[in-house]
Image (cartoon, rainbow, N blue to C red):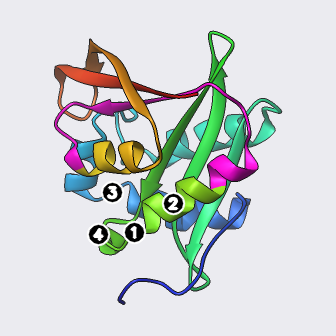
């Protein structure tokens, strides 16, 4: 599939979880995301996590679709009273502009500002997405990355 014609977002549904779980099984994607669940292959833990997200009125979780196919997710929650966003795109669809387009749609709909994002310091693709969207790096921290089994540097970004 080339660059998709239509990228859309919808509220995440229980029926989306099989696809979202499958995307999180990709070894390189897990390594790049770095800050994952302790065991990304644990479906029961994944489902429990998503049940909590979907039940929390402070969380806005949406499924990303490209040409009607589920290709990922975006979400916003609050930490320390400040909005924070994240996204995950199926590695089969990396490099097609989907993350940037989905996050732009999401940020247009979710007007919380400032909004933060965190990214592994070596995740150049996600850094590029954030910077294209106007996020600016405001710092860094050493944090434990489950996917790598060690502390790594993460960059902290903010969009005002």
Segment tinted magenta in the rendering: 106-124
Mark 4 or mark 3, which is nearer to you? 4
The answer to whether residue 132 is left or right of residue 127 is right
Secondary structure found at label 4: loop
Of 15 and 104, nearer the camera is: 104
Across and down, in percent, residue 152 comes to 18, 21
| Labels 3 and 2: the sequence-earlier one | 2
Q: Which of marks 3 and 1 is in front?
A: 1
| Label 1: few (<14), some (14–19) or many (≥20) C-alpha neighbours in 10 Å | some
Task: State if disc 1 and disc 3 touch (CB < 8 Å).
Answer: no
**Quarter of the image where one finds residue 16:** bottom right
Q: Report the front residue among 96 and 53.
A: 96
Q: Does the magenta stretch include residue 120?
A: yes
Q: Name the residue under label 4.
A: 95
Which mark is first along the chain, 1 or 3?
3
Question: Percent x, y for residue 125?
Answer: 26, 52
- Does residue 68 show up? yes
């Amino acid at each position: 599939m080339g660059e998709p014609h239509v990228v859309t977002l919808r509220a995440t549904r229980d029926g989306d979880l099989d696809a979202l779980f499958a995307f999180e099984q990709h070894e390189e994607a897990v390594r790049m995301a770095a800050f994952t669940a302790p065991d990304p292959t644990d479906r029961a833990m994944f489902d429990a996590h998503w049940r909590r997200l979907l039940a929390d009125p402070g969380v806005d979780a949406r499924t990303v679709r490209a040409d009607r196919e589920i290709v990922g997710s975006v979400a916003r929650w609050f930490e320390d009273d400040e909005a924070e966003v994240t996204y995950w795109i199926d590695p089969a669809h990396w490099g097609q502009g989907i993350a940037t387009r989905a996050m732009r749609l999401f940020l247009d709909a979710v007007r919380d500002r400032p909004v933060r994002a965190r990214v592994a310091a070596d995740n150049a693709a996600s850094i590029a997405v954030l910077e294209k969207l106007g996020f600016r790096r405001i710092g860094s921290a050493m944090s434990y990355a489950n996917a790598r089994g060690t502390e790594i540097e993460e960059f902290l970004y903010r969009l005002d």
